[in-house]
Amino acid sequence: MSEAWLADKVNTHNSTDTIQTDVLIIGAGLAGLTTALALPKSLNITVLSKAALDVCSSHYAQGGIAASLDKNDRVADHIADTLIAGAGLCEADNTSSILSAGQQAVQWLCEQGVPFTMIPQQERHQHDNTNSIATLQTSNLHLTKEGGHGCRRVAHADDATGRHIMEALIVKAQAASNITILPYHEALSLLKNSANPNNQCQGALVFDHIHQRKLTFYSRAVVLASGGLGQLFKRASAPNVCVGDGVMMAWQAGCRLANLEFIQFHPTGLAFGDSSFLISEALRGEGGRLYCPQTGKRFMLDIDARAELAPRDIVARSIAEQINDNGLGYVNLDVSHLPAEFLREHFPQIYKTLFELGIDITKHTIPVAPTAHYSCGGVVTDANGVTDVVGLYAAGEVAYTGLHGANRLASNSLLECVVVGRNIAADLPRNLAAIGTLETTLPDSDLNESIYDTWTAPTLKNSQRITLPSSVEYESNCNKNDNHNIHVNINADITGITAGLKALMTSHMGITRDAKQLEQALLQIQQWQQQLNGYDSNQLDIDNKDNPTILNELPYFQLARQLQLATLVIESAYQRLESRGGHYRKDYLNLTSTPRTSVIEPLSKLKEGGIDWLVQPIIDDTEAESVYTVANA
C-alpha cells in the first residue's frame, strides 16, 4: 500500500489534513519494519520514513547480528560479554531478556527471506534444495567474531547484512495489505490528549515533503523507531536523517531520557576525503591489524590483551591518541596478510568500494579513523519498548533499554531492533484492547480509562538526575579568554550554524572530553540559541497553509531542536565525573564507586522547576485545541 491509500484516507479538517490509523510507526528501519510485520494483520499500520526507504542506519549495518547460535556458545556467555562491554551500566534484567531471545529473532529473519551467509557444507546442500532461503535454520549460518565477543557469534549476509535484511523486510512490508509505508513523511511532534492528566499519546503531526503539506495522524498507538543522533557530529556513519528528532519528540511529550553522553565511536571509519563508509569490525575479527603509519608499529598489542578485538571504546580511543600524535588524521588497518580469495568472497562490498577508490585491500593498507556511530542512550523503555507516555512505544537506536550500557557490544544493535520490535508487537494488542476503538483517538471522544491501569512505566536502578542550570552559570564558569576557538557570527545562516554545531560537537564532545571543553561548547550553543531567538518569529507556524512559509520555518525548527538536544547531551557528559565506557573525561580518569544511569526528566517537569532558557519552538494544533496539544507546546 502506498500514496493511493493516503489519498483515500485524507480528510480535510480546518487547516490540516487528518488521517486515522490503528498504529503509527515513525521510522522505517529494522525496528520499525519488524514491529509492523510482527503485529496482527487485522491492524491498520502506517509506517513513516523521513526520506527514501534505504536512508536509515539499519541499511548500512555491515557486520551482522549477534546471537548465541553456535552449539558451543551459551546465552549466559553472550550476556557476560555484553555486561563487560557495558562497563557496569547495562540494565541486567532487560539485557538478559533481550539476548535470551536472540536465536528466535535470527530464525524469524530467516523466515522473512534474509539471505544469511551459510557455512560451506550447508551452502552446497542448500543449492539443491527447492525451498531455498525459506528453509534456512540458525544452525546453518556462518558466524564471524567481532570485538568484545568471546567466540564466533555474529550471523551475517556477506559484509552488507543491514542492506540484505532491509531489502527482505521491505519486500514483505510492501506486500502486506495492512501496512502502508510513506516515504518522505517527517514526524514533527507527538500528539497528546491534554484533557487527561496521564497525557496519552494519540498520533503525530507530520510534514509531507512530497506535497509540501502538513498532516495530522491520529492513532491508537505510536511506535517511535526514528534512529539515533549521529548527525550532530562532523564525521558520522549515520545517514543525514539521524539528527535525534525522535529523542526530542519523546522528551517533549513526557518521556525520560537516559545516558545521552554515551556516544559510541566506531574505531575504523574510512579516512578518505569526506567518506562516511565504515570498515567493518569483522575485518579485525578475521585477523585485521592496526599499525601506526609513521613507525609501522602494531600499537594495540601494548594497550589491551585483546589487541584489535578489545571493545570499541578502547580501540577508538587508542586510534584517536595515535592520530593526535602522528598528525596524519588516520592509522592503517592491514588485512593484506589474509588470503586474497577469502577477502573478496567474505567482504565483497568493502573490497569493491575501496577498489574503486584505488585501495586494493588484498595488497594495500586501509586508512581509518574513528567516526561517530551509535547512541547508547535514548528514550527510557523496558524490554517491551514501553515508555513513560501511555500509548507510546520506542525501539531501536532512539530507545534506551539498558542493553548497551556505557558501550555497545558489536552487532547487538540489530538484535535489539528485532527482539524489541517483536516484543512491542506482542504487547501492543493487549493495550489496544484497553484503549478501545479507533474513534477514541478523535478530539471529541471519551477516553477509556482502563489503559492507564495496564500501562506500567519502565523503572531504572541506580540513577542520577541531570540538572539543567541557567545560562548565567555557564558564563561565570567559562573563562571567555580561553574561548579563542569559538567564534560567533551574528549574521550566520542556518546552514552555517548547523555546520558549526557539527564541528563543535566533534571537537568538544568527541572521544575524549573535559570540563573546559564542555563549558565552552555549552556557551557557544547558547549564543546560537539566542541568535535563532532573534529571528522574526520564535514559533514554527506550521498551521499556515502557505507552503513557502512552512518550508522557510522548518529549517529553523529543526536546527533549534538540534541545539536543544546538543545541550542535553553535553550537560549529561558535563555532570558525569568519571571515565566509563564510551565516556572518557581527561579530568576524571577513574570510575566512580557506584555506576549510575544519568536521567533527564521530561521537559514538562523541567518547566515546572523553572528551566526556561532552552529555545522552545512551538507548534499549535489549532484545529483541536480544546482537547489536543502538541507535545512541545
Image (spheres, helix red, strand yellow):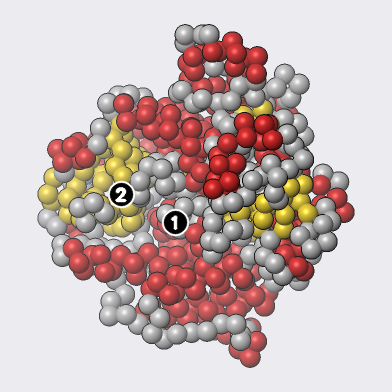
Figure check: 47 above or below 269:
above
Nearer to me, 36 or 94? 36
Which amino acid, mark 1? Asn
Figure check: 379 above or below 179:
below
Secondary structure under tag 1 reads loop
Q: Residues within 10 Å of mark 2 (few under 14, many from 20)?
A: some
> Residue at (67%, 78%) from the top-left corner?
516
Secondary structure under tag 2 reads loop
Q: Which residue is mark 2?
A: 184
Name the image quarter holding the C terminus. bottom left
Figure check: 82 above or below 356:
above
Which amino acid, mark 2? Tyr
Nearer to me, 538 or 55? 55
Q: Position of residue 10 (x, y in %)?
A: 16, 43
Q: Position of residue 117 (x, y in %)?
A: 58, 25
Residue 94 as seen in the image, left or right of residue 254 = right
> Residue at (78%, 59%) from the top-left corner?
292
Residue 139 as seen in the image, left or right of residue 148 = left
Figure check: 535 above or below 32:
below
Q: Position of residue 592 (x, y in %)?
A: 77, 59
> Residue at (60%, 41%) from the top-left corner?
351
Nearer to me, 167 or 509? 167
Q: Position of residue 6 (x, y in %)?
A: 20, 40
> Residue at (54%, 35%) from the top-left corner?
161
Q: Residues within 10 Å of mark 1 (few under 14, many from 20)?
A: some
Q: Is residue 274 visible to the viewer in this orientation of the structure?
A: yes
Nearer to me, 18 or 180? 180
Question: Marks 2 and 1: in contact by CB < 8 Å?
Answer: no
Q: Residue furthest bottom?
A: 481
Q: Which mark is residue 240?
A: 1
- Give the Cα distance between marks 1 and 2: 13 Å
